[in-house]
Amino acid sequence: MKTAIISLIVIMTLCACGGGGGDSTPTPSPNVGPVANAGVPRVVHPGSEVLLDGSSSRDEDGEIVSYHWEQTTGSTVDLVDKDTSSARFVAPEADSREELAFKLIVLDDAGAQDEDDVPITVNIKPVADAGPDQTVTLSDPDTSTITLTGTSDDSDGIVVSHQWVQTGGPGVTLTGANTPAAAFTVLATTQAYSFSYTVTDDDGAQQSDTITIFTTMIIFSDSFSDGSNWSSRWTDVTTGSPGNWIVDSGGLLQQNAVIESQKSYHTGTAAVLSIISGLSDYRFSVNITPLPNNTAGGESEGNDVGIIVRRQDDQNYYRVSMNAKQGFTRFERLKNGIFKTLAVNAIGYVENQPVTMTADVNGDTIVILIDGDPVFATVDDTIPSGTVALYCQDKARFDDVILSEPPLQPAIVVSSPLAYSVALTIDDSDTLPAKAVVLNPPPGGSVVFTLDGGSEIVATASGNEHSVLFTNVADGEHEVTAILRDADGKEVNGDINSTVGTGGDYYITVGDSITKGLGDANPSNNDSADGRIVAIQGYQAALADALTTTGRPQIVFNEGIGGDIASGLNSKISSILERHPGANKVLMMIGTNDSDIPVDPIDFNNQVANIAFKIYDIYNKEVWIAKPMPTYVNKPTLDSDRNDRLSQYNQKINEITADPTDGIRLGPNFYTVFNNISLYADDLHPNDAGYQFMANEWQKKLP
């Protein structure tokens, strides 16, 4: 039965395959083309990796044999794996929201193709700014609330959330952590608290910024609000003429003009904080207002004001002093009664204009700030500890004294070349050395320098001092920048010294009260146009301006000493030159006071020759010697006796300068050209017009 059935099936099959002799090939079905799917539109963030996913493309009756991606609009990106189903690229950085578009082309196994487009929107990340790092001084035992104020912006949308998170320091409780302004409370201890501020925009993009709050505990403060009780804390230690310290109008006022005549270094008067001693590391800050004296004019105006740190006694300390009369700010060290200048510029103060002086003293590093701007810095551990003092020669008010523990905040200060200086390149070449001093360097940090915003140069470190050499430095004005970075390369602090001149000259003017500028009653024209010199008298600023018209930066320091004679200048010239190691030229005029004593012409010759020898042969600086102008006895009567001696002195000056090739040259002959009585303020000293005339005559003599 099973066999019969099988036979029947075979017969039926054979019959079905035969018959009629017609075409037996079946008709093929038509190819169904592929469907490209480039994915869905998306919003992405700059710098993120974006995946273009075409894996949902399909072919119903076969398979896709090739994929190809192309960019059709927007900033060009680098497509990786563009001949696969999933290409990728990095979203470009942009200043505004941008639309990119991409096309996917697919091909199936029958040669049919399809394409699809997908737009990709590049969202601009929001901006988060936690604010600059801060140092906050705190009083003990009070607690303080510190507010963190973040700012944000989203150029192509809105910021929808804010979040503060503490990342370092002793744990604190943040209030308002999800708002732009958060707050926390700390005890009065010196600490560092770090926080991260993150904002999120309406497209989900986030941006973060960090801030560190450095708290510093106050050791001592004084606003002099308790009248005469100030003397229980401060001691007047005037070494010369007595000071006159009183509490007045909420400040400590010193009323006397404590002037030491014919001194190269001033000592003045000081109020010493006597209840504290032996401090090594601290920040000392005070507000100082230089004041006009009760009797205006003359030698009692514009003299030193400043601060003293690490004072051990009247023979050992560091001092910062500003002077309006001669126009300078000096940073000095007194060790065993011998002064050494650590840094100096030609910028003095302005009377009645408050100035805040601050000294950061930390180990072997000392940084001096004026009105918050770092001006001087040095690495010097000669005097390791001591108290602080208020210093002046003139009428001045001191207030708001704060003595605190040293800040923990990292800082860098360009120590040389100084701002508003003229720096001489090495051996008159085009190589300019630069140095910076670092406080509280971050672990693994580094220092780089730039000149005029150019390429960064990694500094060579020696302790807390870092140095570089700039090469191919053109003559003119420059800007030296030092940047302190942490181990990750992030900038944590920087300092810029601007108006650094090269290719010009650094002059010192030496002499008596005429060089100093006595008789110049017009302070309005004693600042140089480039800001290098700020003073109230003399010819130095006018001379610097006249010389600078040559196109080369110039600086002219006033080192005149009232009442000096040639022998006095001879004894002081080394200390004057010590203050100015970067100077290359000296302008000298002396003899007016010698003619009154009178000094014998031969003795005068010997003294002036010795001065010139020291300047040129020992200190290697060129020197010009001017002939002093005539003197009067109750104008308009000339003083014949003194002028006769001046004529003899001037003949000796001719002899000393007879060979100009040796670097000792003849300056202006003021005895001859200064022949107009209208140029005098009194019988000896020029007036404002006279000093302008002197500047012009010096300019004619100088190369």
Image: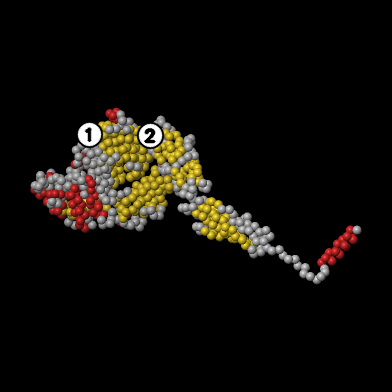
Residue sitting at x 19%, y 57%: 659
Q: Amino acid at mark 2?
A: Ile
Q: Is residue 487 among what the camera can see? A: no
Name the residue tied to disc 2: 218
Q: Secondary structure at mark 1?
A: loop
Badge 2: residue crowd in 10 Å (few <14, some 14–19, many ≥20):
many
Q: Which labelled disc corresponds to residue 242? A: 1
x and y percentages locating residue 386 in the rendered image: 33, 36
Name the side, left or right, on which 95 lies relative to 697. right
Q: Is residue 470 among what the camera can see? A: yes
Q: Nearer the viewer, residue 436 or 369?
A: 369
Residue sitting at x 49%, y 52%: 97
Mark 1 or 2 closer to N-term? 2
* Gap between marks 1 and 2 measured at Cα: 31 Å
- Extreme residue in the bottom direction: 21
The N terminus, quarter of image:
bottom right
Q: Which labelled disc corresponds to residue 665? A: none
Residue sitting at x 32%, y 51%: 499
Q: Is residue 288 above or below residue 455?
A: above
Residue sitting at x 55%, y 55%: 119
Q: Nearer the viewer, residue 166 or 36?
A: 36
User: How many numbered marks are there?
Assistant: 2
